[in-house]
Amino acid sequence: MTAAPLLSVSDLTIDIPLGGRTLHAVRGVSFEVSRGETLCIVGESGSGKSLTSLALMNLLPGRLKRAAAAMSFDGIDLLSIPERRMSDLRGDRMAMIFQEPMTSLNPAYTIGNQLTEAFLRHRKTTRKEAFGRAVYLLEKVGITAADRRMKQYPHQLSGGLRQRVMIAMALMCEPDLLIADEPTTALDVTIQAQILLLLKDLQKELGIAIILITHDLGVVARIADRVAVMYAGELVESGPAAPLFQSPAHPYTRGLLECIPQPGKTRPGEPLGSIPGLVPSLTGRVSGCVFRNRCPRAEEACSGEVPVVAFGDARRVRCLFAEGVR
Amino acid sequence: MTVPPILELKDLAKTYQVRQGMFSPKLPLKAVDGVSLSIPRGETLGLVGESGCGKSTLAKLLLGLEKPTAGEILVDGVAVSGASWRKELSRRIQPIFQDPYSSLNPRKTVRRIVAMPLEVHGIATAHERARMVEEILDVVGLPRRAADSTPNQMSGGQRQRVAIARALVMRPEIVICDEPTSALDVSVQAQILNLLLELRRDFGLTYVFISHNLAVVEHLADRVAVMYLGRIVEDRPAAEVFAGPRHPYTRALLESVLTPDPALGVPDTRLGAVFPNPIDPPSGCAFHPRCPHAAERCRGDAPAPKADGGGRVACHYPIERTA
Ligand SMILES: Nc1ncnc2c1ncn2[C@@H]1O[C@H](COP(=O)(O)OP(=O)(O)O)[C@@H](O)[C@H]1O
Ligand SMILES: Nc1ncnc2c1ncn2[C@@H]1O[C@H](COP(=O)(O)OP(=O)(O)O)[C@@H](O)[C@H]1O
Ligand SMILES: [Mg+2]
Ligand SMILES: [Mg+2]
C-alpha cells in the first residue's frame, strides 16, 4: 500500500525578472513528502533552497514568478487556491521556520503575544492554555526562564534565542507539514542536536512531515528519510538517505561529500577534496547540465539535453554519467 | 636547554563590567578566567566550546586588541608587556576572522587592504610593499587582477583569501583563526582549509584555530583546548581527545558532531540546552548543572586542572580511559 503523499510538487520553476533579463533561479524541481517523513533539501548557498520553500508557502516576493505543472497539499491544489485559504493553511497546517528569524517576528509584539496569536486564532482554546503550551515549547527548545521571555520583545533576544522562539512558534499549532529553512545553522552544535532531536520526537508523536533545508550534510545524514540535492536551481539527485550517502550517484553529490573532513575517513592534515570553479550564470538561456563546467566527468554530450533518470530504489539523478545507473 | 614554547599564557584573565538592565549596577563578567596554555612552535591548537564561552575574547587578548585584567602572555618565553605590548603582539601574531564581510573595508581595493598592516608598521618602501602584496596574493591563490577589485565585488571564499593575505603579508609567526570558515559553503571551506594547511607547512606557522566544527578541528589541530565559561576544562593532544575525551563536557561536544553517516541518528547528549549566565556562574564546577555525572562535591568545589597523560583535565570524576 502506498498512501498519497502529503505534499507533492512537480516541475516547479521560479523566474526573477532583472531589468529586461530573467534569472532562472529554480528550474524543473519535483519532489514529494509523506506524513511522518523527513525530506532534506541540501545545497550550497544560492542554489534555490529558500526560494523553493517560499514558493510552497506562496510567500515569494511579488515580482518573482512561480510556475509548476502541479502542486498539492493533502489533496488541495496549491496553484489555484485563493490567497485567503492559503493564509489559513499557513501557520496552522503548514508551518515554516525561516532562515532569518526577524522576517517573521514582529518587533512591536512580545514573544508571548506572537507565540499564542496563531494558536488562539486557529484553535478553540483559552489564553491560559495557549500560554502554557508556549512556555512548554520554549522550554523544549532550550530557553530558560521561559515565563520571563514571554514578556520580552524580539530585539531583547540574541539571534540564537530568536531562532529557537521561531521553532517554538512553528510548532504551536502542531502542523501537518513543517518547512524548516536552515533552522539550526546559526546555533551551537549542542543546541542543534537538541533541536533536531525535538523535531524527530515531535514527528514520531504527531506524524508531522518535515522538509528540512540545510547546507550541512551531517544534519542530512542524521535525520533525513529522503534527500534532494540541489545545485544552481535544479535537483541533481534525490532518493532515500542511506543509499544516497552510501553510493552518491551525481558527481556534485560526490564532490560535496569529499569536501568535508570525516573523522575516521579523511586523514588529519591531508588535503580535502574540492570543487573547482564557480556556479554558472543563470540569467538568459540555461541549457544542458548546469554542473558541467565544474565536473570532472563532463563530456561534449553534457551541453545537450540531460534528462532525469530513475534507478535503484526510488532514486533519481540528472546526469549522463551517473554512478550506479545502467 | 629546552626551547620555550612560541606562545604561553599564564593565568590569563579578562573581566568585563556589564549591566543587565539600563538602571542596574555594573557586574563583573569573567569572559576569560585563569587560562594557562602553552603552544610549541609550528603546532596548531584547536580551541573549542559553545558560543559565549570566551573563545573570541581569548583571541583578542592574544592579538593585543584587549588588555588582560590579569595574567601574562609570553612569546618565545618573553613576557609581552609595557607600552609597546600591542604593537609587539601585532607584528608577530595576526588574525583571520570569521566574517570577511565585516572585517574588510568594502570600498578599499584589495591592494590597499593587504598593504595596510605594512604601512601601519612602517615596513619597507612603497615600491617594496607593492611587490610584497603581489607576492602574497599569489601565495593565497588570488589572481593578480584581484588586487584592484574591492571586497564587495568578490565571493565569500575570495574575501577570506584577502583576509588571509592581509594576515600573512606581515610574515607573522602565529596566526589566530577565529571561525575562519564558518560563514563559507563546504566546497569553499575545503579550499580555505587546504590553503591554511599549505601555508602552515610552507611558512612553519603556529595556529590557534577556533571553531565550533569539531570535525574541522580534528582535521587541523595537534592539540585541543576545550573552554567552558571562561576556563579550560580539558587540554590534551588532539588524537587523544578524539579517541577518548576525559571531561564530560568534551564528550558531549564530540557526540554533538554530526558526521555524515546515515546509520547514526541524532545523538542525545543529555546535556540540557542551557548555557549558564556568565554574570552569575554556577558554584563549584561551572559545568555541574548540565553534567550527567555531577556529584555533591562538584556543586561546592571547583576542580583545578590536573595533569592527565599528555595534557590536563579539570574534573573531579573524569571519564575512564578506554584505551
Ligand atoms: N528577491 C530576490 N531578488 C533577486 N534575486 C533573488 C531574490 N531571492 C533570491 N534570489 C537569487 O536566487 C538564487 C537562489 O536564492 P535562494 O533560494 O535564497 O538560495 P539558497 O536558499 O539555496 O541559498 C540566488 O542566486 C539569489 O541571489
Ligand atoms: N566587549 C565586551 N563587553 C562585555 N561583555 C563581553 C564583551 N565581549 C564579550 N563579552 C562577553 O564575554 C563572554 C565571552 O564572549 P566571547 O569571547 O565572544 O565568546 P565566544 O567567542 O566563545 O562566543 C560572553 O558572555 C560575552 O557576552
Ligand atoms: Mg537560503
Ligand atoms: Mg566568538
Image (cartoon, rainbow, N blue to C red):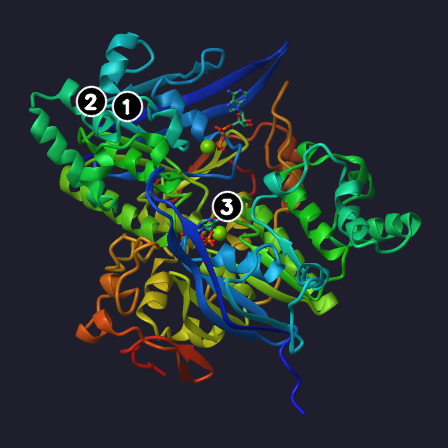
Q: Amino acid at mark 2?
A: Glu
Amino acid tagged 1: Tyr
Disc 2 target residue: A117
Quickly name the residue at label 3: A253
The residue closer to the viewer here, A297 or A253, is A253
Q: Residue B200: which quarter of the image?
A: bottom right
Q: What is the x, y in percent for residue B106? A: 68, 34
Which of the 4 image quadrants contains residue B99?
top right
Label number found at residue A109: 1
Residue at position x 64%, y 68% in the image: B81
Residue at point 22%, 15% (across, down)? A88
Task: Give the amino acid type for the residue marked by disc 3 in the picture.
Answer: Thr
Q: Nearer the viewer, residue B186 or A111?
A: A111
Left or right: residue A65 compared with residue A202: right
Residues at marks 1 and 2, CA–CA distance in whole angstroms: 10 Å
Label 2 crowding class (10 Å Cα cut-off): few <14, some 14-19, many 20+? some
Ligand 3 has an atom within 8 Å of the beta carbon of the residue at disc 1: no
Q: Nearer the viewer's eye, disc 1 or disc 2?
A: 1
Q: In this picture, is B155 found above or below B16?
A: above
Q: Please, which chain is the residue tagged with disc 2 on?
A: A
Q: Quadrant of the C terminus of chain B?
A: bottom left
Distance (Cα) linking label 2 and label 3: 42 Å
* Tally of numbered discs: 3
N-terminal of the two: label 3 or label 1?
A: 1
- Helix, strand, or loop for circle 1? loop
> Helix or strand or loop: what does disc 3 sit on?
helix
